[in-house]
């Protein structure tokens, strides 16, 4: 009920000025009525006399005068309505943009009260890492674009300060190889472990307990300084072997026009057989690409002696005697059959 009264009061205040238009147009109607003449042209000529007669009394004296006032008021209200509705389509006085420099009050809702929980943007501005602030309106993605030429300080003034926040997992592209050298020890030590009260935890000797980062390095320039990836660790079934072979061939065929489909199928059978043998029969420490390369290098062929068997042939013969239906044996037989067809042709 209270809300209805407030709404009525608000509407009354907004429409109060139109009562003035009601009075003005009613007076105009009265002046036209009192002007001498029979038709409208004569009344217009005597309109000045009509106005002088109309101002002699405060209120219009006839119902027709009030009807003219009501019609005039309605026309003015409708004109204002159309103007207001049309104003939504245009941004008056902001044709050249409405951007402005932000203030501390603008950025404050997007920052965490604890400085260490923010992405550092400037000396005084940051962006909270939490993806769920108390007010969802202040939730933002954490993508930051830093543009600058070589030597402009992108690493020195953005990457390193944000690494020192130690609040996230980081993936850093380090072409110069300096970030790992300069920040590796810090990441290896990690940030202090905190309790529920937000204070650092300490051991029995009173020393602060740190949570170290796990650092993984992929160096394509110096492989001795790089961690290594072994696809064999992710093989769990025959389907995984076929996936690995497909990816291996797709990424080693080079550029240019593809060759005969026959050779690709033969290569697929060979790799499938060798990788299957390594995965199922080789010790765990030999399940890697080094063993695969050694087996390929050991596949000696003698054109003058078709009955010659190399070391790999002997391995598969021994495996066939032990398990004739072995996955690797079946693939190797298909490969040898294809190779035999080529030799016979």
Image (tube, rainbow, N blue to C red):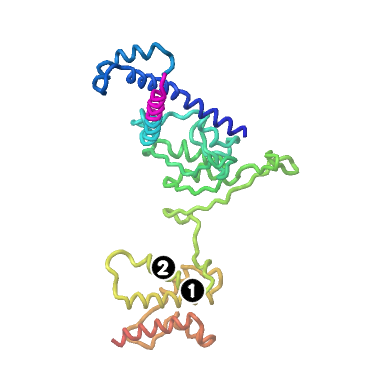
SS at mark 2 in the image: helix
Q: Which of the two labelled residues, at mark 2 and mark 1, occupies the earlier sequence position?
A: 1
**Residue range highlighted in magenta:** 61-76
Nearer to the camera, 187 or 105: 105
Can you see residue 206? yes
Residue drawn 47% across the image and 54% down it: 218
Give percent across and percent down for residue 230: 50, 64
Residue drawn 58% across the image and 41% down it: 133
Tell me the quarter of the picture where residue 79 sits: top left
Residue drawn 49% across the image and 81% down it: 327
Q: Mark 1 — residue?
A: 239
Q: Is residue 43 above or below residue 175?
A: above
Nearer to the camera, 145 or 92: 92
Can you see residue 167? no
Depth check, mark 2 against mark 1: the one in front is 1
Q: Mark 2 — residue?
A: 248
Residue drawn 60% across the image and 44% down it: 190
């Amino acid at each position: 009920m209270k809300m209805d009264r407030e709404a009525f009061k608000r509407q009354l205040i907004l429409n109060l000025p139109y009562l003035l238009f009601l009075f003005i147009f009613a007076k105009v109607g009265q002046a036209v009525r009192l002007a001498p003449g029979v038709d409208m042209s004569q009344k217009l000529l005597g309109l000045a006399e009509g106005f002088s007669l109309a101002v002699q009394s405060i209120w219009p004296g006839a119902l027709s005068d009030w009807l003219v006032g009501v019609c005039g008021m309605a026309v003015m209200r409708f004109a204002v309505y159309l103007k207001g509705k049309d104003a939504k389509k245009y941004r008056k006085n902001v044709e050249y943009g409405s951007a402005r420099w932000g203030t501390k009050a603008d950025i404050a809702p997007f920052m965490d009260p604890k400085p260490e929980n923010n992405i550092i943007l400037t000396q005084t501005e940051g962006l909270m890492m939490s993806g769920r602030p108390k007010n969802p309106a202040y939730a933002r993605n954490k993508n930051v674009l830093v543009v600058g030429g070589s030597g402009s300080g992108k690493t020195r003034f953005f990457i390193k300060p944000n690494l020192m926040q130690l609040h996230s997992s980081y993936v850093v592209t380090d072409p110069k190889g300096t970030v790992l050298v300069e920040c590796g020890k810090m990441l290896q030590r990690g940030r202090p472990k905190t309790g529920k009260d937000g204070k650092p935890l300490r051991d029995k000797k009173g020393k602060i307990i740190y949570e170290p980062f796990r650092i993984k390095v992929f160096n394509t320039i110096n492989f001795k300084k790089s961690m290594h990836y072994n696809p064999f660790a992710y093989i769990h079934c025959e389907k995984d072997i076929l996936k690995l072979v497909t990816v291996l061939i797709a990424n080693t065929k080079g550029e240019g026009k593809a060759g005969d489909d026959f050779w690709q199928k033969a290569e697929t059978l060979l790799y499938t057989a060798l990788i299957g043998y390594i995965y199922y029969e080789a010790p765990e420490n030999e399940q890697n690409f080094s063993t695969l390369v050694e087996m390929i290098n050991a596949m000696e062929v003698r054109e003058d002696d078709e009955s010659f068997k190399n070391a790999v042939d002997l391995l598969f013969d021994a495996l066939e005697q032990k398990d004739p239906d072995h996955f690797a044996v079946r693939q190797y037989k298909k490969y040898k059959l294809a190779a035999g067809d080529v030799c016979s042709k």
